[in-house]
Amino acid sequence: MEQFSAYGHALLAVAIYAVITMVLNAVTGIRKGNANMAPGEGYKADYDDPSYRIDRAYMNSMELMGIYAAVTFSAVLAGASPFWTNVLASAILVFRVLYTFAYFRKIGAGYGGVRTILLVLSAAAIICLCVLTAVSVF
């Protein structure tokens, strides 16, 4: 659909994030299976446990996926600036990839560290996409 081609980066960013989330799902599922955990069972909260961190990264990705997709698609459908929609949606993807990497590698503190900064940057970009959408429809 040619009317959406200007938003290619934003749409691809959402698609890539969906794939990342599905990969995290598979990795945490395999780890839970190897640990003989029951379906739906969660890990004991232990930031030092890599399996816990991977599972939390997956859950955090699932929590954000719907919001990220909704605000990005809203901006696209509202005809918001393709440049800013692409920049913001791509920035969110970059922040979330860095967030997941920091979680995997245990970079920073459990709270208030680099992950929190990346989470806040993601939230700020999402809010900017919402504002961009609102400006476009009014």
Image (cartoon, grey):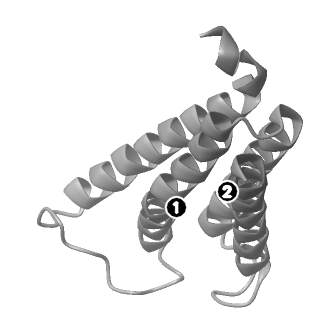
Determine whether the residue tagged by mark 1 lies in a helix, strand or loop.
helix
Cβ atoms under marks 2 and 1 closer than 8 Å: yes
User: Can you say whether 15 is above or below 53 in the image?
Assistant: above
Q: For the N terminus, give its image quadrant.
A: top right
Quarter of the rendering containing residue 105: bottom right
Is residue 98 something that shows in the picture?
A: no
Left or right, 71 with reference to 125? left
Q: CA distance from mark 2 to mark 1?
A: 9 Å
Q: Could you tell me the amino acid type at mark 1?
A: Leu
Q: Total number of numbered labels?
A: 2
For disc 2, the marked residue is 96
> Any mark on residue 64, and which?
1
Q: Residue at x 47, y 47 (%)?
A: 21
The amino acid pointed to by label 2 is: Arg
Looking at the image, which residue sits at the far right?
A: 83
Query: In the image, residue 71 lies at what x, y percent?
Result: 60, 52
Who's the residue at 68% across and 52% down the image?
97
Q: With 138 as the anchor, is 50 left or right in this view?
A: left
**Crowding near pointer 1: few (<14 within 10 Å), some, many (20+)?**
some
19 versus 66 height, above or below = above
Disc 2 secondary structure class: helix
- How many C-alpha atoms fall within 10 Å of the one at disc 2: few (<14), some, or many (≥20)? many
